Image: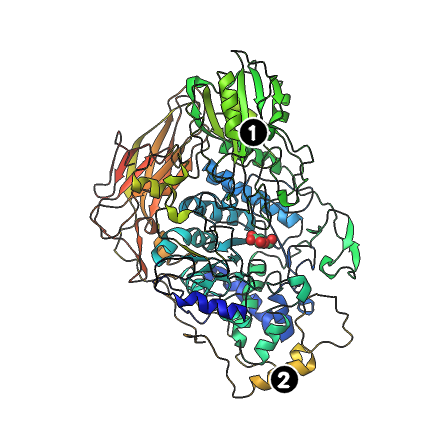
Amino acid sequence: MVLAVLLSLSTLAVGAAIDKRAVPAGYVAAPSYPAPHGGWVPEWTDSFQKAAKVVSGLTLAEKTNITAGTGIFMGRCVGNTGSALRAGIPQLCLQDGPLGVRNTDHNTAFPAGITIGATFDKDLMRRRGEAIGEEFRGKGVNVYLGPSVGPLGRKPKGGRNWEGFGADPVLQAYGAALTVEGVQSKGVIATIKHWVGNEQEKYRMYSIIQEGISSNIDDRTLHELYAWPFAEGVRAGVGSAMIAYNAVNGSACSQNSYLINNILKDELGFQGFVMSDWLAQISGVPSALAGLDMSMPGDINTVPLVTAQSYWMYEYSRAILNGSVPVDRLDDSVTRILAAWYQMGQDNNYPEPNFSTNTQDAEGDLYPGAAPGSPKGVVNEFVDVQADHAVVAKEIARDAITLLKNVNSTLPLSLKASLKIFGTDAEKNPDGINACTDQGCNKGTLGMGWGSGSARYPYIDSPIDGFKKRGANYSFYNSDSFPSNSNPSTNDVAVVFVTADSGENYITVEGNNGDRDSSKLNLWHNGDDLIKDVAAKFSNVVVIVHTVGPVLLEQWHDLPSVKAVLFAHLPGQEAGDSLMQVLYGDVSPSGHLPYTVPKSEDDYPTSVSLVSDVVLVQPQDTFTEGLYVDYRHFNKEGITPRYAFGHGLSYTTFSFSSATITPVTKLTSTPPTRPAKGSTPTYSTKIPAASEAYWPDNFNAIFRYKYSFLAKSDADAAAKIGNSTQKYPYPAGYSNVQKAGVAAGGAQGGNPALFDVAYDISVVVKNTGKTSGKSVAQLYVQFPTGISFDTPIIQLRDFEKTKELAPGESQTVKLRVTRKDLSVWDVVSQNWIVPNVSGDYGIWIGDASDTLNLRCGTKAATCVGGQTSPV
Ligand code: BGC
């Protein structure tokens, strides 16, 4: 009722100027029905055949049991589906998070997504995914709840940007696809999340008093920015996708038929299953019709433990019997879930969960949500899944370190240097490395942000541990205030550790509700003051920043004694030696910024500020900046940032030369016609017998556990409606006739022709300095002049990190641009089009977005060095 009133309030002002109450005109979530059946791409045919065979033998209650969780805290994992044991289908264990197995022991706390993004290293991205996959498998997790590519990083203060790979769709796309490939190569189903527009934490969820925030995104921006990484995750064969809490264009993502049915399952050709985010589902039938396949954790969104209700499970059984949801919709969901299970080979000796996300104790409640009456038993078996993953974790932490400034070759340090070290971030949290639940505090070395994207640390190799192990000559002042006893001497090098943290909305840390709404883009714990105080007394200052994202450096960056600045991002457990290897010059730093560092918060468009102060009505977040986020915006407005996207220094120097460009696939303005959809399993449309959902006799139900059975009387009553002439009031635009598929689709990721290579590019990268090091060749596309589409000046389309090059050594790096890379999304024809086939695209290559001096032109198919960077 309250919701209904709110809904009507929020729609009153449609068409008005953008305000916080109404979805502005032009931002539409069009109805799109029915949910496309899965199984139509050749890569999934076998798995769908196997799955469909099982599904054809399941009862109604078994099917609905598979599509939902058993309830919050009703099992060992954060999500636990119901099983169909009679048919050999176990419960599936779904577990966070993107950087490692959450809430357990003997796991690796890998560097966060933003850190692997900063490596710009595809090989490391893939190897990190493999190691993560091994750990999830080792703990018996069927479904890995990562990678995260939504948020994209539109809002610099957004709380969860650090779970993803950086503020650019192509960087996110490589991060996602390579993580998916790595994880799934170990038989674990990966989950690409959160689909889509989850760009701020505040107001993300629907509640009984307020609708979740509406991210209002136009169609072109959706395609060219926010959907891009999802498309690549799907192309990599991802087995599941998680919808976002928020609404898009006024319609909750959990039941937004346009997003799930039309874009994800049809245009992007997603074959796996779509799950809700936790308690994000807000209805039963509409979400099923809109293409949701799995309800997580199974409860309704309001006070779940109190009401113990579900939108699905028994309600889904009822909805099938009374004819509200067509049977083939349920069959398709179950088939998608089981197909993903077969696709990863989980039918073959897959381990069962051997840990509990709910406790660290060996024994405890099997179903803590049923407390105090829960049966008890062994819940944690302390299986060590770390293997040698610390090695790759450390390599990532090291190769992500981004050197921003290094005057007078202050770095690398000599081992003899007399160091004065400041800042609590240099040493572990004295209360314990896992003292705060889900890392919901910023105390001691900052290795990750907080929330479901965190993991427990098995240990932290802190920077101080690293200095100790090196035998460094140092004194450490474990405080964030400048101490009076540091005895500055002219030969000292002062090393200052500072942080900026953020996380998920359910935990508030130092006034920050997930987003950096209180700290803003400033360093935490008066970090600016500490640096300024140190800089006033010492003449050689090195600043090391552990951060979730951009921070303001202006108060101290240009002080003469601040000689070096580096971002070590979020290194996970391997914060110490990785840093030492760079500080002492075992290796040259080779990380690059996965976002822009501004000079002021005002450098950003106002539309990317956090939406706040909205009461009762639906908050509106309208993406009026369109394509112009992060560097795309800075470049358009001619704003010089403090450091540009992609920036990162080395101890050596590199040249980029002898580039070549080779046309591969001849472009046409629209892509060749897509392949037709392959066949999908055939499902009956006949409503099953009510007896398929009856409560079994003598069944021992667990308090608050979610079951899919119905009391006989309820099942019979539902079946009576289903067999009558009464029809469910379907939403506008509803149809249950499968469609041929949109022009832009055709395979996983979209029309396969979009990924045809249009041009191969090669460039010789040479180490022209005196130290070994790795370089990153970054490739940005500039669209031809005179086209009728407004496009950002440059956009990252590919990158490649070199191997470690000795002084004087060269490597030929291969890059490519695809048809999609040279296309824009045309909202009228609903297709990707090359705006000027014979136009001269600039293919710019360099090692940062603002130092692009080598240009290859598509028209003449030649490359010329020594050019003025386009931005
Ligand atoms: C988060 C998801 C997470 C889920 C399960 C939600 O609050 O948004 O990213 O996977 O919880 O913990």
**Residue 36 visible at all:** no
Residue 828: give x, y in percent of width and height.
29, 62
Q: Which label belongs to residue 100?
A: none
Residue shown at 77%/70% (left/top)? 700
Residue 577: give x, y in percent of width and height.
59, 27
Q: Amino acid at mark 1?
A: Ser
Residue shown at 60%/83% (left/top)? 719
**Residue 346 visible at all:** yes
- Can you name the residue that lies furthest to the top here? 490
Instruction: Tell me which label, 1 or 2, sits earlier in the chain.
Output: 1
In the image, residue 367 sits, relative to residue 800, either above or below, namely below
Compare residues 570 and 44 and report the one nearer the observer: 570
In the image, residue 494 sits, relative to residue 55, either above or below, namely above
Q: Quadrant of the C terminus?
A: top left
Q: Quadrant of the N terminus?
A: bottom right
Residue that carries the numbered disc 2 in the rendered image:
717
User: From the viewer's perspective, is the residue at label 1 or at label 2 nearer?
Assistant: 2
Q: Quadrant of residue 772?
A: top left
Compare residues 2 and 648 and report the one nearer the observer: 2
Badge 1 marks a residue whose secondary structure is helix
For marks 1 and 2, give the CA distance. Answer: 65 Å
Lateral position of residue 136 relative to residue 702, left or right: left
Residue that carries the numbered disc 1 in the rendered image:
578
Compare residues 552 and 3 and report the one nearer the observer: 3
In the image, residue 856 sits, relative to residue 564, either above or below, namely below
Q: Amino acid at mark 2?
A: Ala
